[in-house]
Amino acid sequence: MYALVDCNNFFVSCERTLDPSLENKPVVVLSNNDGCVVSRSKEAKDLGIPMAAPAFKYKELFKEHDVKCFSAKFELYNFKSQQVIKIASSYVLEFETYSIDELFLNLTGFKYINIYDYCLDIRNRVKDEADIPVSIGIAPTKTLCKVANRIVKDFPEKFNGVYILDSPEKIEKALKWLNIGDVWGIGRKLAVKMHDNGVHKAWDLLQKPEIWVRKIMGIHGVRMINELKGIRQLELDSPSPKKSIAVTRSFMEMLTEKEDVRERVETYGIYCSERLRKQNMCCRMVTVFVQTNRFRKDLPEYRNAVTQILPNPTNSSILIGRVVNELFEAIFKDGFHYKKAGVIVNDFVPEDQRLISLFEEDMQNQHLPVMKAMDAMNKKFGKDKVRLGSMSGQNTFGRTQMSPEYEAFLKNNTLPEANFRFH
DNA sequence: TCTGGGGTCCTAGGACCC
DNA sequence: TCTGGGGTCCTAGGACCC
């Protein structure tokens, strides 16, 4: 059996650890620029605030019900996440950190202990020591663990935070209850296709011929039906090195000046380079994209992206900045209101295993010592304290005022390196 | 006025090779 | 004039996840 430990309303729960008076009140956490709702307390969900709701549309509702809003504080969330992982994973020999607020535990071989009590103990200790409430779903496959977790969350008073989904009877009952759109791996598009074909509950999918599933969903679908039947298709993964790094942001205000957008894009390129160096990796491909505000139908729309393959792999901010600049020149057009831009790097090679083109000058090794020195200084004195001339160093997105509790938190905690897919 | 960010994997189709 | 077939590799785009 596997267990899925899932933090309840994770970002909101983190906020509550700083300010316990938020308990039992509606609370939301907002994305960068305070644009969207990315985490909601139960009370906020009950008010009908959907996930990813644009904050501006709900201003009135927030006011009316005194919903507490917070800007995202990723340093805090990472720190709390590490605490939860450390406690929960200490109970097993093998685990997988699935995301910032979820981890799978391998309970295989736990024959002679009561799994329910064991997991209840995990839950209580995480609550006591990290002050984060979690739900635990236990089942023979990862996909069924997700289902079990869903059941825990939907019937809180019934299950006390832990539910085991093991017998065929329980599984059948659960799948006849679960909407197809709530199955792990069914997104919005697939849910529509399912409904069009009379598949409304998870159970309905199991009644479809495999050929059909294969055609509609590809290889995912076949894996999914087996997982739902309790036949394991997905193992626990060990952390794999990243295959791409992206820095993309919406701008607070729309930008029309070429130089303003250029400065942003170059800065994103430099951030990508820094993150590459942190992993001692070089990239062979750089992509730059720019786009206008897709919601403003009254303004002309434009979006474009372009990719370049580098002759020599690099992680030098200077070299990547230069490429970003060229690519930016290739796609930027005057006369548009730009809202978002980004830089993505991929196709990685370790710093010490680079293959160099015979014909192209290779500056990587000359730059590297300077770059590493810059990184060291920024680590010591603070982000962007030492930077290239092309960066303005201005903060690019707004944040609400930091609370005294958070200031104190930042001061008192050495923050671990993030190694997650963020939500 | 105001609408997130960062990832992974799969597939179809084109280019190219023999 | 008529012009095969199979394989690989790469890429763009689409789907999903949190």
Image (spheres, coloured by chain):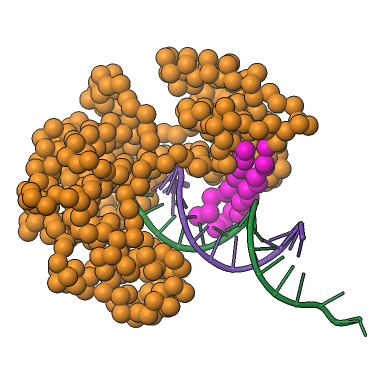
Chain colours: A orange, B purple, C green
| Total numbered circles | 0
Is residue A26 visible in the rendered structure shown here? Answer: no
Write the start and end of the magenta stretch as one range. A284-310
Q: Position of residue A133 (x, y in %)?
A: 16, 43
The answer to which of A180 and A351 lies nearer the viewer is: A351
- x, y percentage for residue A220? 41, 64
Residue at x 37% of width, y 80% of height = A209
Q: Main secondary structure of the magenta part?
A: strand
The quadrant holding residue A348 is top right
Whether residue A92 is visible, yes or no, is yes
Is residue A376 rendered to the left or right of residue A264?
A: left
Image height check: is A189 above or below A418? below
Is A69 located above or below residue A194 in the figure?
above
Residue name at image x 25 percent, y 43 percent: A94
| Quadrant including the C terminus of chain A | top left
x and y percentages locating residue B7 in the rendered image: 46, 45
Q: Is residue A299 magenta?
A: yes
Image position of A211 (left or right of A407):
right
Task: Answer with the quarter of the image where residue C12 lies.
Answer: bottom right
Is residue A78 part of the magenta span, yes or no?
Answer: no
- Indicate whether A27 appears above or below A415: below
**Camera-nearest residue between A296 and A347:** A347
State the image coordinates of residue A375 (x, y, percent, origin top left): 49, 19
Q: Quadrant of the N terminus of chain A?
A: bottom left
Frontmost residue, A380 versus A341 = A380
As drawn, A80 above or below A371: below
Q: Please state which of residues A413 and A340 is positioned toward the viewer in this rendering.
A: A413
Residue A351: name its quadrant: top right
Residue for point 32% across, 53% down = A235
- Which residue shows up at 17% across the image and 70% down it? A168
Could you tell whether A285 is left or right of A210 in the image? Answer: right
